[in-house]
Amino acid sequence: MINRFGIKISSSAALLLTILALHYSSGFYPSKILCTLPSSYSTPSYSLPALSEPYTYLSHGRQSFVFESADGQSVIKLFNQAYFQKKWYHIFFLSSHLRQKLDKKLALRQTFYQESYPLAAKEFPEDTGILYLHLDASTSLPSIHLIDPSGRPLTLDLNQCAFVIQKKAVPYLPHLQKVATQEGLPGLIREIDQWLAFCSKRIEQNVIDYDHDIWNNVGVLDGKILFIDPGKFQRSPSPLDQDALQLEWWKATHRLYKWLLTNNPEAARYLVSKTHTLCVLDTNTTK
């Protein structure tokens, strides 16, 4: 009985330590960022930008772990390869129907991984702040010094990692709030025009964005909008028809419209009028 009790306590303690480790590491492990998925993207021929080290853990999403440079000017996103791969328990505990559903979801994730950032790096480097993209294992890159989520120093061989280096931008929503407070309608009209100009540029090239979370995907640097997370960009194989255009403009603007409607209704009306005009123009262009 004592032995059983001792084993039970030991197992519980081990489970607790595992949970705490996952919490304080934010799920980050070096093995998760190794280049394990195939990619047709070729490593750029130009040099890696100067690294301001160490890069300190900043945040994470489903696709990547983000580290900020020592000078605060750039971030490196280390792609979480585990997000794009099956988990071991899917084979044993999921029904055939759920496994098929998961397979489709994973296939879509892998498609985005293989296409989205390469598309953004090629077509929109200035608009996304992408400085360097690396998806396949290589031999010419240096190691990088990081401070991991638990505050420990870590050295990684970049040749073995899937990553993107981007300019660092401030979040879009706080920027808009500041503009609304300090400049009112004229400032918001300027911001609306700038956002619509980027969206128009993307849509004119038949690039669809399957993620319309403008608050997490968009930032501002030196007054210019940067699309900091193009992780669900995909080029349409054919020109967008009227329905697709309307859907794309709705995805690009509906969250901004809701915010403007609450904070500056006149700016919201301006957004609606401009979006309608742009959608009509785009539709005429595709005829």
Image (spheres, grey):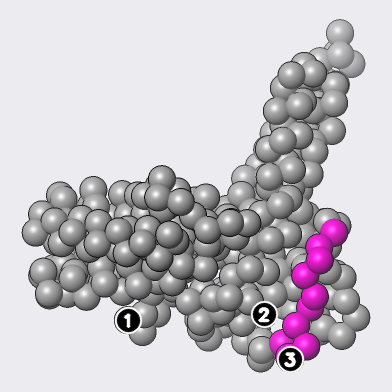
Name the residue that disc number 3 marks: 47
5 or 262: which is nearer to us?
262
Q: Is residue 155 visible?
A: no
Q: Are marks 2 and 1 in contact (CB under 8 Å)?
A: no
* SS class, disc 2: strand
- Going by the numbered disc 1, the residue's amino acid type is Gly
Residue found farthest to the top:
1
Residue farthest toward the front in the current orientation of the protein: 287
> Considering the numbered disc 1 on the image, is that residue within a helix, a strand or a loop?
loop
Q: Position of residue 230 (x, y in %)?
A: 55, 63
Q: Which residue is at a point 32% across and 81% down the rendered structure image?
A: 223
Quarter of the image holding residue 20?
top right
Residue 74 % position (x, y): 55, 80
Span shown in magenta: 38-48
Residue 48 position by quadrant = bottom right
Crowd rating for badge 1 (residues with CA inside 10 Å; few <14, some 14–19, many 20+): few
Asked if the magenta segment contains residue 52, the reply would be no
Q: Which of 205 and 29 is in front in this view?
A: 205
Circle 3 sits in a helix, a strand or a loop, which is it?
Answer: loop
Quadrant housing the C terminus = bottom left
Q: Mark 2 points at which residue?
A: 132
Residue drawn at 36 percent across, 62 percent down: 284
Q: How crowded is mark 2: few (under 14 residues within 10 Å), some or many (20 or more)?
A: some
Earlier in the chain: of badge 2 and badge 1, it is 2
Q: What residue type is labelled 2?
A: Tyr
Residue linked to disc 1? 223
Q: Is the magenta stretch mostly helix, strand or loop?
A: loop
**Image: 7 above or below 66:** above
In the image, taking residue 239 as reference, residue 39 lies left or right, namely: right
In the rendered structure, the answer to whether residue 134 lies left or right of residue 182 reads right
